Amino acid sequence: MTKIFNDPSDFAEEALAGFCDIHAGLVRQVPGGAVRRHRPAKPKVAVLAGGGSGHYPAFAGLIGSGLADGAVVGNIFTSPSAQQAYAVAKAAESGAGVVFTYGNYAGDVMNFGMACDRLAAEGIQVENVLVTDDIASAPPSESEKRRGIAGDFTVFKVMGAAAEAGADLAEVVRLGRKANGLTRTIGSAFHGCTFPGAAAPLFALEDKQMGLGLGIHGEPGLFDTDLPSAKELGQEFVSRLLAETPEGAGDRLAVILNGLGSTKHEELFVLWLAVAPLLREAGYTLVQPEVGELVTSLDMSGVSLTITWLDEELEPLWTAPAETPAYRRGNAAVQSGDASGEEMSDDAAAPAAFEATEDSREYAAACLAALAAARDCLHTAETGLGDMDAIAGDGDHGRGMVRGIDAATAAAAAAAGQGAGAGSVLIAAGDAWADKAGGTSGVLWGAGLRAFGESLGDQRSPDASQLAAGVGAFTDRITGLGKAEPGDKTMVDALVPFTETLSRLAASGAEPRPAWEVAAVEATAAAEATASLRPLKGRARPLAEKSVGTPDPGATSLAMIFTVMGPALAGPGQPSPAVAAVSRQQGALS
């Protein structure tokens, strides 16, 4: 259990700062993460690993010669924002391009993708390499949907060695994707991990049970089974991995037996005695295997086995020297270059100058009141939303939403204080939400609020049709990014009914307040109805059966937020039955 912390919401940031202080000779902290202390002597491809915190040594612990040039670090188990990825890339880029490499999770894909668009627009060569090694998360026919877990390390190592040897961007990317295509992982969990400040782990297992097919974001296994002996577990792992031997694969393997956070090294050594003979008996040569903690999940009790089929290209990169704070192999010479480096400026940007009408500034006050109502609602429901998310996800939805709304409310207030109109206030709120919340919900809410603000602008106080158009822009931006549809068991299941109802009533001449309230009732009912659905998108998809019977947390929180925002955004009046219903729901979730 994670016991050492101050404010739990600051845990990830403080851990990164402490890490960078301890290892100041090798790394330096920059906005969004960390990079190598010394710039390369000549331009080289910058390999940037990234994802949420809680996986140490991944990701920052792997910064150094022969491995990563930097790490983009999000909150615990939460995707870093596009702004964080962009900032780290700008700090690490040395003239030969940038490649982001990360596990295949929706929030990471969206945020790193948006960072790539921004970097490319500035003329920087940029690419992505996704890791999809988890064989339990999708069948071979859908391997592109698989999660990235401990196989991250093999892919990072291959790419880092290739870049260190002087390969260009296209070659580093090719080799990384090749390594990913030849990497397979299976894992099991014995007990869930516990967030700093949380009273209980994200999941628990019955005595003498284990969950096979774990995730590294605190997710339970895909199914529970009796706890086997070490020999039986080794046989289970090896048989499942070798059943997916790639066509034409060779007989030399890179092997990682990885502890998830609280599995003792001695236990791993015992399991290795079961795994290694089976692989050797199958005709394989094990090339510099690794046993220890390389990709963890806070304090989860669990283990995973990763194998990568090597060839004449990949083996020298796997065995190449590396020197990082958490991992060393061979004798890697640390590049000296310019020891001072070019430090990122943390100076605050000059306040923006806003041009807005008084009507829009008055409506901006209503937007602030709406955000404040959403903030109060989410703080009350945080624990319940997290528990709901932990059924088939990583349990961070409540915390992520609270981080997002807190940042959004503060940024909106600051913009309003500088004279911003309603549109700019919502844009500021959206950008802050995406930057601080991270993850899929963070990027979607941030992008949606930005689109809402762009639609409203700073020149008017909206009528019913203009308000509906703003909500329509919010919805279009979210569905365009997330690619989810009604029935996929996501926030879209509540969002689309809300938008369609509001637009229909506004077109018929209804006043904003009653139209909004009716739409909120529709959204709430739709969110509750997601309990019967199986998730087709996001982290809950691999645990679809466990999700049945529980409403989607994203749909639930969206319906709650839109309901309590209504009195401010859609005009004054008496509290509606919809708001009263949300108050009762908050009480149930708190």
Image (cartoon, grey):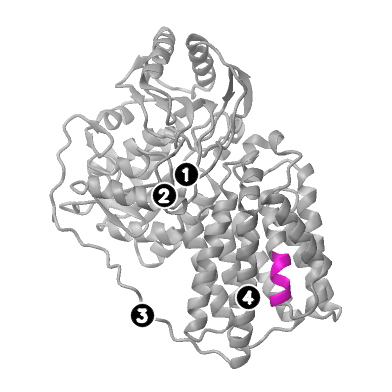
Residue at x 39%, y 60% (from the top left corner): 86
Q: Residues within 10 Å of mark 2 (few under 14, many from 20)?
A: many
- Which residues make up the magenta segment? 562-568
- How far, Cα to Cα, is label 1 from label 3? 36 Å
Amino acid type for the residue under numbered disc 4: Ala
Q: Position of residue 575 (x, y in %)?
A: 79, 72
> Mark 1 — residue?
196
Q: Is residue 277 above or below residue 44?
A: above
* Res 350 label: 3
Q: Is residue 308 visible?
A: no
- How far, Cα to Cα, is label 2 from label 4? 29 Å
Q: In terms of sequence position, does the residue under pointer 2 or pointer 4 come before the other?
A: 2
- How far, Cα to Cα, is label 4 from label 3? 26 Å
Q: In terms of sequence position, does the residue under pointer 4 or pointer 3 come before the other?
A: 3
Q: Are marks 1 and 3 in contact (CB under 8 Å)?
A: no
Q: Position of residue 217 (x, y in %)?
A: 51, 39
Q: Are marks 1 and 2 in contact (CB under 8 Å)?
A: yes
Q: Position of residue 578 (x, y in %)?
A: 80, 65
Residue at x 48%, y 12% (from the top left corner): 230
Q: Are marks 2 and 4 in contact (CB under 8 Å)?
A: no
Q: Are marks 4 and 3 in contact (CB under 8 Å)?
A: no
Query: Where is residue 389, by image quadrant?
Result: top right
Nearer the observer, disc 4 or disc 3?
A: 4
> Mark 4 — residue?
369
Nearer the observer, disc 2 or disc 3?
A: 2
Q: Main secondary structure of the magenta part?
A: helix
- How far, Cα to Cα, is label 1 from label 4? 31 Å
Q: Position of residue 499 (x, y in %)?
A: 75, 67
Could you say whether the residue bearing mark 2 is in a helix, strand or loop? helix
> Mark 2 — residue?
11
